[in-house]
Image (cartoon, rainbow, N blue to C red):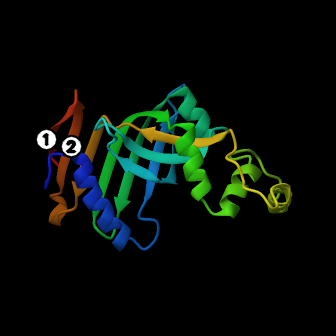
Amino acid sequence: MESQDPYVIFDSWFKEARESELNDGNAMALATADANGHPSVRMVLLKGHGPDADGKGGFIFYTNLESRKGGELAANPHVALLFHWKSLRRQVRIEGPITQVSDATADAYFASRARDSQLGAWASDQSRPLDSRATFEARFAEVKARFEGRDVPRPPHWTGNIVSPTRIEFWQDREFRLHERWVFDCEGDGWRTQMLYP
C-alpha cells in the first residue's frame, strides 16, 4: 500500500474511480441488519468522507429516517459498506457504527441538492406501499405548489449518517485470482495494517 493511512489510500482510489467509472463512482452498497439480525443491502451514494479535525471522521450518506433502512439503522446502528469499481478492478469494504451528522451539516447538504430532489424528499413516503406512479406524481405536484416561491427546508425525517470505520479493507484484482488484500483495523488512535490471503 502506498500509505499507512487508509483515508489517504481511499482518497487516491476514489479519485480514480470518479474519473473512470461510467456512472456514479460514489455508489456504494450499504448493508444493514434489523433487530433480529436479518440482513438487507441496497445501493446509496457517498456524499462525504475523510478524517475530521480529531483524525476520526468517516463516510457520509443521507436517507429518510422513516424508510426501511432508517428503521434498521435505528434498531442496529452497525453497518458495512462496499465500493466495487469494476473499471479499476478494485473493491473497498468498510465496517463500523453509524451516528447522525449534525443538523447544520444535514441542512447544508440538503440546501445544495437540486430543487426537485429536495421536493422529492418531502413527497416520498420511502419504502411504504404505493398504489400507482400517478399518486406519487400528484404528491410531488402538491409539494411543489406548497413551496412555490420559497426555499425548501430539510424535512425533519431526512438526515445524514456517518459511518465511523473500525475496519477498512482494500482489494485489488490480480491475474489468476491471486488478488491483493490489505486490511486496516482501528486500534486506539491509529490503525493496525496487515495483508490477507486472497
Query: Which numbered dot is residue 194?
Result: 1
Task: Give percent across and percent down for residue 12.
Answer: 25, 60
Taking 154 as reference, is 175 above or below it?
A: below
Query: Which numbered dot is residue 183?
Result: 2
Task: Give percent across and percent down for residue 188.
Answer: 22, 26
Label count reads 2
Left of 151 or right of it: where is 165? left
Left of 16 or right of it: where is 111? right
Instruction: Find numbered disc 1 in the image and state the secondary structure of the residue it sits on.
Output: strand
Q: Residues within 10 Å of mark 1 (few under 14, many from 20)?
A: few
Q: Which amino acid is tagged 2? A: Val
Instruction: Find numbered disc 2 in the image and state the secondary structure of the residue it sits on.
Output: strand
Task: Give percent across and percent down for residue 167.
Answer: 28, 38
Task: Give percent across and percent down for residue 170.
Answer: 24, 51
The disc, 1 or 2, on the residue closer to the chain's N-terminal end is 2
Q: Residues within 10 Å of mark 2 (few under 14, many from 20)?
A: many
Q: In the image, what residue occupies the spot 14% across and 51% down?
A: 3
Q: In the image, what residue occupies the spot 68% across and 62% down?
A: 115
Find out whether the residues at labels 1 and 2 contact each other: C-beta distance under 8 Å: yes
Q: In the image, what residue occupies the spot 70% across and 44% down?
A: 155
Left of 81 or right of it: where is 55? left
Q: Which amino acid is tagged 1? A: Gln
Taking 145 as reference, is 32 above or below it?
A: above
- Quarter of image, res 148: bottom right
Q: In the image, what residue occupies the spot 63% across and 40% down?
A: 68
The Cα atoms of the two marked residues, 1 and 2, are separated by 6 Å
Taking 187 as reference, is 55 above or below it?
A: below
Q: Nearer the viewer, residue 195 or 189?
A: 189
Query: Which numbered dot is residue 62?
Result: none
Left of 150 or right of it: where is 13? left
